[in-house]
Image (tube, rainbow, N blue to C red):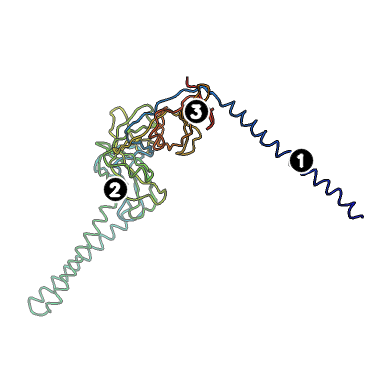
Amino acid sequence: MNKHLFSLPWLAGLSLSAALLTGCQKAKPAAVETLASSVAAATDNVPVTLAPVRQRVLAQPIAASGQLSSETEARLSFKTGGIVRRVLVREGDFVRRGQLLAALDLTEISAQVAQAEQGQTKARRDLARFGRLLADSAAPREAVENLRTAYAVAQEQVRIARFNQRYSEIRAPVAGRVVRKLLNEGELAAPGTPVLFMNATAGATWVLKAGIADKDWARLQVGDAATVLLDAYPGQEFAGQVSQLAQGADPATGTWQVEIRLRPRAEARLATGLFARATLRPRRQATYRVVPAEALVEGEGENAFVFVPAGPGPGGTTKVRKVPVQVAFLQGPDVYVRHGLDSLTRVVQRGAGFLTEYSTINVL
């Protein structure tokens, strides 16, 4: 009997829960219908304007940026190592062709030259003495031939020492300007370590080196046109041309380098390191559909949607259809679409942001 008494509240609670659940299930379709009708009412008869889908055949431009440099720039260094004795120029100095720019302390190098010359003198003396003995048949011919070889080696050692002595100073290879001084007097210069960095001024060719993505690199060819903008000269455009394409990716950045040669302007003074932005125009063209940027909705990366008229709706309105598109690039107020609009002639322009897939529109 006690078991029946304790089970009654449990049965009553179960009955109450079932009743509530049944009531909610009956109320749910009505609430959904009310919400759907409210949304539909809010998006019915939306006033919009339409824009035509235009077609254009052109090459998608490529944006790149980098620093300006000169094709005639030179990193000057000593062939041999040693202590820097003199640096005769400063950054920004103009230098003439053949002008002495820097020199090493020649104490060690001059000693090496003297040592090689003395070795040459001894080899010549030995060869002369044994040559006389050979004439008197007092020395074997093989010994004389060995001395002749030793004398030839000594001569070459003198040539090497004098060559190193000559390149223990730096002279300007062309007329130009010193851009950067990398070592000072008293410092130890290793062989081949850059000491001065200079640019030629007469007939200098300026180039912009920039990294681009592999998909853009594949569309470019040597000779493609470019427009270059320099921060130093706002509002002025410099014409350019692709002069070189890298044949391998930069392992540090993963980009592919393109070199753009600029056509100089008389009124613009250029210098190494100026920041520049370029717009490259490949010769390979493609067909794009063009619509106003205002027509795009829900854009993410290259993917977006547009609304297009989809036939008559109730009360003189027009239904719409949501169409996915793939954007190629933006240019001014227009969007160039790669895929998605091939068979369409019009898209919703003004008012597209207020539409859903269930909207009807009133074309103004």
The amino acid type found where label 2 is placed reads Ile
The amino acid type found where label 1 is placed reads Leu
Q: Which residue is mark 2?
A: 170
Q: How would you rate the neighbour count of disc 2 (Cα within 10 Å): few for under 14, some for 14-19, many for 20 or more?
A: many
Q: Quadrant of residue 173?
A: top left
Q: How would you rate the neighbour count of disc 1 (Cα within 10 Å): few for under 14, some for 14-19, many for 20 or more?
A: few
Q: Which residue is mark 3?
A: 319
Horizontal side, residue 200 vs residue 65: left or right: left
Q: How would you rate the neighbour count of disc 3 (Cα within 10 Å): few for under 14, some for 14-19, many for 20 or more?
A: many
Mark in front: 2 vs 3: 3
Residue 59, compared with residue 101, is above or below; it is above
Q: Position of residue 254 (x, y in %)?
A: 40, 49
The amino acid type found where label 3 is placed reads Lys
Q: Quadrant of residue 87?
A: top left
The residue nearer to you, when weighing 314 against 275, is 314
Q: Residue at x 26, y 55 (%)?
A: 165
Q: Position of residue 6 (x, y in %)?
A: 88, 52
Calculate the distance from the C-alpha at mark 1 to the C-alpha at mark 3.
Answer: 40 Å
